[in-house]
Image: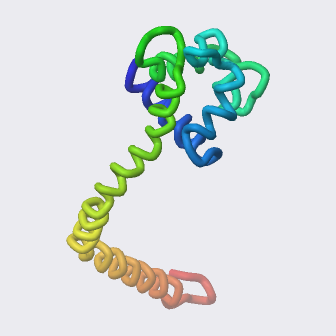
Amino acid sequence: NKAAARWQVEVWSHWASTHYDNATEAWTALAQPYGGEKGVAWSAWPQVWASFIGNSSAVVGEEWQPGFAYLDSSRDGYVSEDEFADGFALSSSKARAQEAESPNIVSDVTEVVESNQWMYYALVAMGVVLLGCCWLWWCRPKRDGVAR
């Protein structure tokens, strides 16, 4: 599933961008020790991915495979430094896209809140009525100390 693999790489990208300033620094720390001329091979990718999931020795299961398949856009069985950089950039490109959309989202939310302000007043009024009913029930006349 390509969408699920992209999401997995976006999560990885977000993690990597919080730990490394740029793709080159991340490549040097994470992938270069396991890479060759063409990049990091399929067989070596579990060690690269293991740093992301917090296990530096091995990856349990096959959760690294969709990420590798997504990053290996050339389909040559290697994640090159350029492909790695493209994956690293997913988090920042998504953040830029969300920033561009955020003014619209904020204005939409403000508009909805303002258009539904009557609900706030209705809830406050219902609360006041409920408190009044509770007060009346509590203060009702009692006969011989027992409520009627």
Residue at 46%, 39% in the rendered image: 89
Vertical side of 124 occupied by 7: above or below: above
- Residue extending farthest to the front is 37
- Report the number of discs: 0
Viewer-nearest residue: 101 or 38: 38
Residue 118 as seen in the image, left or right of residue 20: left
**Residue 128 percent coordinates (x, y):** 39, 84
Left or right of residue 148, residue 111 in this image = left
Q: Quadrant of residue 106?
A: bottom left
From the viewer's perspective, tell me whether residue 15 is left or right of residue 72.
right
- Image vertical order of residue 109 relative to residue 49, above or below: below
Residue pictured at 65% horizontal, 45% vertical: 19
Q: How is the image coloured?
A: rainbow
Choose between 20 and 144: the one closer to the eye.
Answer: 20
Place of residue 60 in the rendered image (x, y in percent of width and height, measured from the top left): 70, 17
| Quarter of the N terminus within the rendering | top left
The structure residue drawn at horizontal position 55% and vertical position 88%, both measured from the top left corner, is 142
Depth order, front residue of 71/127: 71
Rendered view: 119 above or below 94: below
The picture places residue 74, in percent across and down from the top left corner, at 41, 15
Q: Going by the picture, which residue comes out furthest to the right?
A: 57
Q: Which image quadrant is residue 53 in?
A: top right
The residue that appears at 33% across and 49% down in the rendered structure is 97
